[in-house]
Image: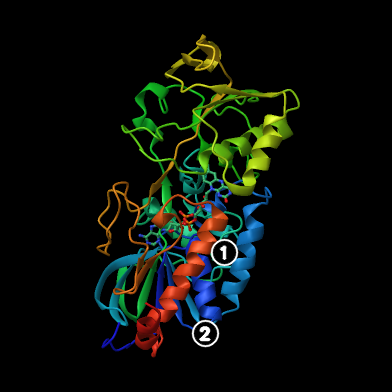
Amino acid sequence: MPGQAVESQVILVVGGGIAGITAAVEAAETGYDVVLLEKTASLGGRVAQLNRYFPKLCHPTCGLEINFQRLRGNARIKVFTMATLAGLSGARGRYKASVAVSPRHVNANCTACGDCAKASQTQVPNPFNYGMDKVSAAYLPHPMAYPMRYVVAPQVIGTPEADAIRAACKYGAIDLDEQPKTFELAVGAVIWAVGWQPYDAGKIQSYGYGRVANVITNVEMERLASPGGPTQGRIVRLSDGREAKRVALIQCAGSRDYNHLAYCSRICCLGSLKHAAYLREQYADAQVDIYYIDIRAHDKLESFYRKIKADPQVRFIKSKPASISAGENSDPILHGEDTLTRELYDRPYDLIVLATGMEPSAHGVTPALKLSTDDYGFVVPEIDEEAGIFAAGVAAGPLDVSMSVQSATAATLRAIRAVRTNGAAAHKGQA
Ligand SMILES: Cc1cc2nc3c(=O)[nH]c(=O)nc-3n(C[C@H](O)[C@H](O)[C@H](O)COP(=O)(O)OP(=O)(O)OC[C@H]3O[C@@H](n4cnc5c(N)ncnc54)[C@H](O)[C@@H]3O)c2cc1C
């Protein structure tokens, strides 16, 4: 802005999902220093947790690994994992950011050899698989983690087991005394790319999630189908290991519903079409029923919808199911009315998958940054030229991967304009 001196040209990116990574590498490759903060133990965000992703049904590792290479090779980017923004003061071009880092208890000497995990007996819920299985208290976040470094879970710190974990490491990588810390940074602009979290399916009482066996969510289905998931990619029921061949996919589970998420997350229909593809690839005799209000397949992805629709073993049933109850042999039973035929149904399935929507990560949490949001918690406006703060990816609204990347590129361009030493003039000229 006119009259504001740029004291720091560093761009701070908060959130290490696909949007944040894209912003970081693009700013750095343009010649700007970047600090990237990620609150979990590794980068990649929700994309890393997908089994495959449309449009081409690639494995997420292929898209992410290209970006990790770009990160690794660029000295301008500093990455802090288990880190978040604790406070921000100042103004565009001269912010002081306070960064809070949680202890990982494993330092950069780690070679990911896994000896620490062998020395650990305690099992903790595996966050990467949404708690569907467990990992030892010394664990690698996932096989393609960046950084490729173990974490020691806080549950064992201070116990004899932690000492055994430290003793097992021949590289001196275990630091049991590590404490939470904060440090300050001078930055000129902020890209806010904190993404989304799955809507809590337990809030949709009538669908019995957490109460009725074999009712799972769409994000859990991604992990179930993944070779790195709790069943090594076999789509089976967690209750008894039986193959899931009769499967119902429920669209708009909580979405477009004023009691839950009033908006459409744009992605869930395509996610379920992808799940139908996973099931049909795995079981030649699978029968998949997709219950929908209307199918929303945006842009070029209409052809993916048409392909799945042509499969005679995938049925599209126009209906918003009323409820799910527990049946015999742990079969969940779906109850409702077909909107087109008015037929009432009570159908047992092996597995029911709830397509829950994307809720903004920061929803319900007061972020260090006082950002304005819409009624749903997404950041508006995405672009705040005056403050030099820009939202990217799903932090600004429900987007797929390619749209998140585009939005990150746009945010990067704006952030660069905000920190250029001649940025004020350029901004004035183009406003
Ligand atoms: C079931 C399902 C299937 C999907 N399948 C596809 C698909 O096949 N193809 C496709 O294109 N899209 C798909 N999507 C959408 C895709 O997941 C999103 O487009 C993508 O995750 C957006 O990336 P992002 O970086 O904006 O957010 P995220 O992936 O959520 O990344 C945000 C990152 O920020 C971190 N973070 C959060 N808060 C903080 C904080 N305060 N400080 C520091 N870090 C923080 C998070 O830990 C995370 O690493 C799917 C979505 C769903 C629900």
Determine whether, in the image, residue 429 is placed left or right of residue 121: left
**Residue, disc 1:** 148
Residue name at image x 50 percent, y 38 percent: 132
Quadrant position of the N terminus in the picture: bottom left
Q: Is residue 402 visible?
A: yes
Residue 278 lies, in percent from the top left, at 67, 36
**In the rendering, at what x and y percent does residue 363 appear?**
31, 49
Apparent side of residue 81 relative to residue 96 in the rendered image (left or right)? right
Q: Amino acid at mark 1?
A: Met
Image quadrant where residue 73 sits = bottom right
Secondary element under disc 1, as helix, strand or loop, is: loop
Distance from Cα at disc 2 to Cα at disc 1 = 26 Å
Q: Which residue is mark 2?
A: 31
Residue in the foreground of this view, choosing between 255 and 346: 255
Q: Position of residue 261 (x, y in %)?
A: 36, 38
- Residue 18 in view: no
Q: Residues within 10 Å of mark 1 (few under 14, many from 20)?
A: some
